[in-house]
Amino acid sequence: MLRTRLLTAAVAIPGLWLIVQFVPPWRPPWGAALFVGFIMAVTAAGLHEYFAMALPEHPFERVVGIMWGIAVAAGVASRRPEFWGGALALGLIGGLGLTLVRNADLSGAVQRLGLALRFSLLYFFSIGMSQAS
């Protein structure tokens, strides 16, 4: 895991610096889109790493969590609160529904849902609130 984190940092930090330094956000059509695309790619990599650690024996929940996190990130990137709010609501409803459908291990399913919610809510409060100010 440490090697993956170091590799991510070795790619993400210089890439972010290059985009911020040399690509003005007002340059249409690709300035802001390049920045948002880069942030979404780094977010997807972070989600993959988080869910690989949080849910190692549950690949279906891992994929659902990654997709849900990308939907929340896309909602935040769109700067429209109804998109990220909708993604959070759909994730919560879908996660609770998934918990009820896969009820062989109900307490474990609820715990896995809590792990998925924790990451997305932390992402929302760290990125979403910084854009609101």
Image (cartoon, rainbow, N blue to C red):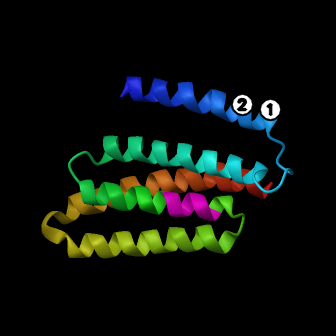
Mark 2 element type: helix
* Residue 22 placement (x, y as % from top left): 80, 34
Q: Residue 96 occupies which quadrant of the picture?
A: bottom left
Report the disc number at residue 21. Answer: 1
Q: Residue 109 carries which label?
A: none
Amino acid on which the number 1 mark rests in the picture: Gln
Left or right of 66 on screen, residue 58: left
Q: Does the magenta stretch include residue 64?
A: no
Image location (x, y in percent) of residue 41: 54, 47
For the residues labelled 2 and 1, the Cα–Cα distance comes to 6 Å
| Range drawn in magenta | 70-75
Q: Residue 17 carries which label?
A: 2
Residue in the picture at 49% in, 49% down: 44
Dot 2 crowding, Cα within 10 Å, few <14, some 14–19, many 20+: few
* Residue 122 located left or right of residue 106: right
Residue at the (55%, 43%) spot, across then down: 42
Q: Write the residue at 86% across / 51% down.
A: 26
**In the rendered structure, which amino acid carries the disc numbered 2?**
Trp
